[in-house]
Image: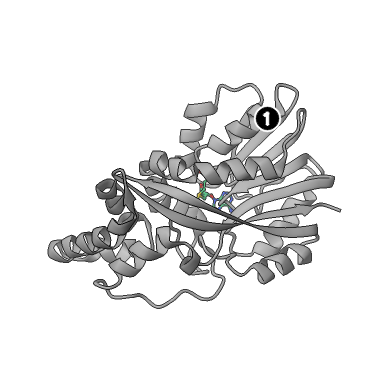
Amino acid sequence: MSAPNAKTQDQAAYWNDEGGRRWVENIERVERMLQPLSRRLLEGAKPAAGEHVLDVGCGGGVTSAAFAEAVGPTGRVTGADVSAVILDVAKQRYGARANLEFTLGDCAALPFSPARFDLLASRFGVMFFPEPDAAFAHLRRAVKPGGRLAFLAWRALDMNPWMGVPVQAAFSILPRPEPPPPHAPGPFAFADGARLQGLLEGAGWREVRLETVEAMLDLGDPDMAVQQMIRMGPPAPIFATADAATQENVIAAVLQAVAPHVTNGRITMPGATWLVHATAP
Ligand SMILES: C[S@@+](CC[C@H](N)C(=O)[O-])C[C@H]1O[C@@H](n2cnc3c(N)ncnc32)[C@H](O)[C@@H]1O
């Protein structure tokens, strides 16, 4: 899972181009990996029959479909995503469901009518806003008074060996780029829980609570997973420009690093997230 880490880079362009293509190529493996976390999101968000839910950065729509199931025929789910290429997958898979619609656009700017939703939910779709304070204030206005926010965001890279171990191994061979500015948009933008709490409170959310959710993640068959992780993760741009011999060395190093985590032919590694809860005043 990756995204450009520089604040200046255009997230919409990234997710509509390489980021979107990579996500779609990897979608089955990544969605399987995220399954145990999705269950926790659904339990924590408590969607009720008849509610209207917004799934922010809905990706291929698997969580939107789960919420649609939970709110039933009298409820409604809107899955919104900035990436046309990813949203096409959601529409192909779930577009026929009567209580589920998909909207293309930037959730920080889409003109949602005020107080439209009972619940805003997201599985790793909210860490990419270049201006998260403004984005969370915009989203709050779309929620009814007393409505809820529930989302998953990754904790720090060093608490997420599923990403940290392969990245470290790849950069033992590839030159390491300049670190991104702190809190730059990207998978780990909300690693700092105190900052995230302050950011949401500053955006007008109340009763902000960060719950720690950890799970063992099934990354899949080592050969395929390593190929995909290198092409999706932080080493991806440098790996892409390396010569063939260096690329082979990187793949070998990452395979070696994940080998202790292979059980029954699959890489299984821990992941650590925040499950964030908040209420609209
Ligand atoms: C890591 S993926 C997660 C996708 C999906 N929630 C899932 O769990 O399968 C992040 C998603 O957020 C979307 N995204 C990023 N910035 C966005 C924005 N400002 N508005 C809407 N979607 C956004 C991306 O296009 C991508 O589909």
| Residue in the image at 77% along x and 42% along y | 113
Q: What percent of the width, then of the height, locates residue 148? A: 77, 47
Residue furthest to the bottom in view is 178
Q: What percent of the width, then of the height, locates residue 160? A: 47, 62
| Residue in the image at 70% along x and 24% along y | 72
Tell me which corner region of the image, top left, top right, bottom left or bottom right, holds residue 42.
Answer: top right
Query: Does the rendering let one see residue 205?
Result: no
Q: What percent of the width, then of the height, locates residue 123? A: 58, 47
State whether label 1 is within 8 Å of ligand 1. no
In this rendering, the count of numbered labels is 1
What kind of element bears circle 1? helix
Query: Does the rendering let one see residue 60?
Result: yes
Q: In this view, does 179 lie above or below 212?
A: below
Residue furthest to the left in view is 245
Residue annotated with mark 1: 70
Q: In this view, does 2 lie above or below 32?
A: below
Q: Is residue 100 left or right of residue 246?
A: right
Tell me which corner region of the image, top left, top right, bottom left or bottom right, holds residue 167.
Answer: bottom left
Q: Is residue 185 left or right of residue 111?
A: left
